[in-house]
Every structure is written in structure tokens, then in C-alpha cells.
Amino acid sequence: AQTVTQSQPEMSVQEAETVTLSCTYDTSENNYYLFWYKQPPSRQMILVIRQEAYKQQNATENRFSVNFQKAAKSFSLKISDSQLGDTAMYFCAFMKHVNYGGSQGNLIFGKGTKLSVKP
Amino acid sequence: GAVVSQHPSWVICKSGTSVKIECRSLDFQATTMFWYRQFPKQSLMLMATSNEGSKATYEQGVEKDKFLINHASLTLSTLTVTSAHPEDSSFYICSARDPQTSGSYEQYFGPGTRLTVT
């Protein structure tokens, strides 16, 4: 079974600074996907960034980037130039590879990290 | 982008009654939908996987007779909480994927439904 661990229940960062959220996972799969989701107070889940395990290059999306270490099973999220709107719960998630047309593909979530950006 | 809606967004019901939550994919065909449950300040826990036209697959520990899932069309899945009790009070979130598109790992979340059982 796959597990996702987020060891930082809460973090805070000053506006405009950089923060890194940690995530480790355990799996025997070789082909999978990793995600970071943001859940603001509205509770709408928002995809921040995703990484395909077969890709060595770390994913980046504007101010968000990941450090994907497949051998170490580590997938951290770096938020640069933090903004007040980044305040939210952040969940790391794992999904096994699903064949084209496959019927599974559920996400396994970590417990989350509550990030507060302070002005 | 793909949109998933949920209705209602908030429902209060009395103990012993049943409540139905709808999850709709608005602009794509969702052959697979997922139902998650989220307790306050906790993570999302998968309850069941719903495939159009077939019976849902429930996760271990989820009572299938209590949480009835119907995925009768390619755009609609419903979760019915039967004989609700206060301990069923939670935030229920659905998500949907369209396995027929490229990037089949894409999953789209609804805004969630807050259920309060009094």
C-alpha cells in the first residue's frame, strides 16, 4: 500500500520570502504521479503542481517548484515570493499510473501542512 | 478547464433521515468519479470509486449500505447518506476524471458539500 507523509503540520513565512514544504512517500510502484494541492478556506481543492515519476526534470509552475528525489521518495514544494493568497492547507498526493481508459486513479493524500503567509 | 459541481454546498438534516449529494461534471464525460470525506482539520480520505454503469468500489471500513453511490450517467454521480447520524457530519468532496483524454491522470474536484446531522 502507498503512504504519503507530511511531517510539518504548520508552517509560516513572511510575505515575499521563500518556503519549502516537505513530503515523503512510500510505494513499490515504479510509474506514478505526485501532486501538490492547495485548499484555501473555501475548501476548494486546487492543483498547484504535478510531477510524473518517469520525468527526471523537476516541475515548475511560476512561483511553485518541486524537488523530486525518486530514490529517496521525496517530493518537496518550494514557494518563492510568498503571497498572502498562498495562505492555505497544502496536501501532497500520490497516484498510481493508470492505463489509458483505466477506471481507477484515486489520490492518496498526506495529512497536510497549514501554511500561513504573514504580512 | 474542466468543472465539477456539487449540490448542495451545505445541508443540515435530522438524525435518522437520508440526504443525497450530487456531483456533476459540467463540460466533460466523467467515466470515473471519486468520493472523499474530510473531517475538520484533517486530510481527504477516499470513500469509494464510482464508475459509470457499474457498482461502486468502496474502501475498507466504508459501509456501502450506508453510503449509497450511483453513477448512472457520464456526468452525474450521487452519494446518499442513509439514516444519517451526527458522526456522519463531515465535508464530502467528489472528484472526476475522464480517462479517455490525454493526461488521464487529471482529476477535477468539486467544491465540496458540508453535511451537518443534528
Image (cartoon, coloured by chain):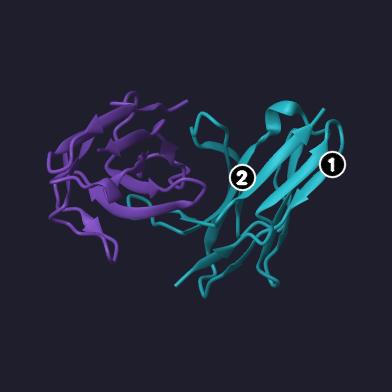
Give the colour of chain A.
cyan
In the picture, measured across the screen, residue A116 lies left or right of residue A30, that is right
Instruction: Answer few, some or many: residues within 10 Å of disc 2's Cα (few below 14, many 20 plus, some between 14 and 19).
Output: many
Residue A70 x %, y % = 67, 67
Q: Please, which chain is the residue tagged with disc 2 on?
A: A
Q: Residue at x 24, y 59 (%)?
A: B58
Residue tagged by mark 1? A18
Q: Residue at x 44, y 73 (%)?
A: A1
Query: Toward which corner of the image does residue B76 lie, by quadrant?
Result: top left
Q: Residue at x 25, y 38 (%)?
A: B118
Secondary element at tag 1: loop
Residue B22 x %, y % = 24, 32
Q: Which chain is purple?
A: B
Separation of residues labelled 2 and 1 (CA atoms):
15 Å
Total labels drawn? 2
Residue tagged by mark 2? A90
Residue lying furthest right: A17
Q: Please, which chain is the residue tagged with disc 1 on?
A: A
In the image, is residue B51 above or below residue A6? above
In the image, is residue A69 above or below residue B39? below
In the picture, measured across the screen, residue A81 lies left or right of residue A33, that is right
The residue type indicated by label 2 comes to Tyr
The residue type indicated by label 1 comes to Thr
In the image, is residue A22 above or below residue A81? below
